[in-house]
Amino acid sequence: MGFQGEDPLAKKFRWETAPTRFFTHTDLAVEQQFGKRDFIESTAYLAAFEGGVKQLNLEIAVASDKAPQIFGTLLHNELLEVQLLSGETVRLFNTLPSNGEWLAAQGTFVFNGRYTLGIREERLLRSSEVDKVLVRWSLVQELFEVFETDFFIRHFNCLAAMLSKEK
């Protein structure tokens, strides 16, 4: 279960699944420096708005205050490519540009992205397992392996259960 209520900005009712881990990554060269956590940790959740619009909300936490120099920013209309185990690819585009924010207490630089899901994207993600995710930043692009391969299936099922309770 996540959140349901009126979105203060959109002035529409919205439903959200609870954020869960989407992917993590630590290069082997620096693995010893990150004993209890990964260099990059990502969580994500789905949101649905009154009227049928759905989106993927993505948070990427990088355990370095140098993250903007390494990766850059998440630009508006920049690509997030979800590679499915079936071999198909789903391309999503960011609608929430993010320069990131340093959270000193956590020792992470956090970036947030928001990706609108069309009918085709929803159909594919709802019924397929995820293999990898390509994140395109302003300076680099990185391909991350997803271990929670049923991430979208679980989140769409949860969202459907929340929406069916409303009807």
Image: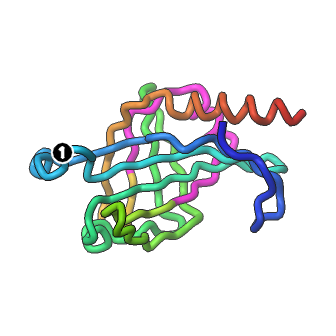
Who is closer to the viewer here, 108 or 57?
108
Relative to residue 114, is residue 66 depicted above or below?
below
- Going by the picture, which residue comes out furthest to the front? 105
Residues in magenta, as a range = 113-134
Residue at the spot 76% in from the left edge and 59% down from the top edge: 7
Q: Is residue 37 left or right of residue 74?
A: left
Classify the position of the N terminus by image quarter: top right
Residue at the spot 64% in from the left edge and 47% down from the top edge: 117
Residue at the spot 62% in from the left edge and 44% down from the top edge: 46
> Number of marks in the image?
1
Pointer 1: what residue? 35
Residue 58 place in picture, x, y as percent: 51, 53
The question of residue 133 being in magenta is answered with yes
The question of residue 48 being in magenta is answered with no
Q: Quadrant of residue 139?
A: bottom left
Residue 68 visible in the current orientation: yes
Who is closer to the viewer here, 2 or 145?
2
Q: Is residue 9 left or right of residue 56?
A: right
Circle 1 crowding by C-alpha within 10 Å: few under 14, some 14–19, many from 20? few
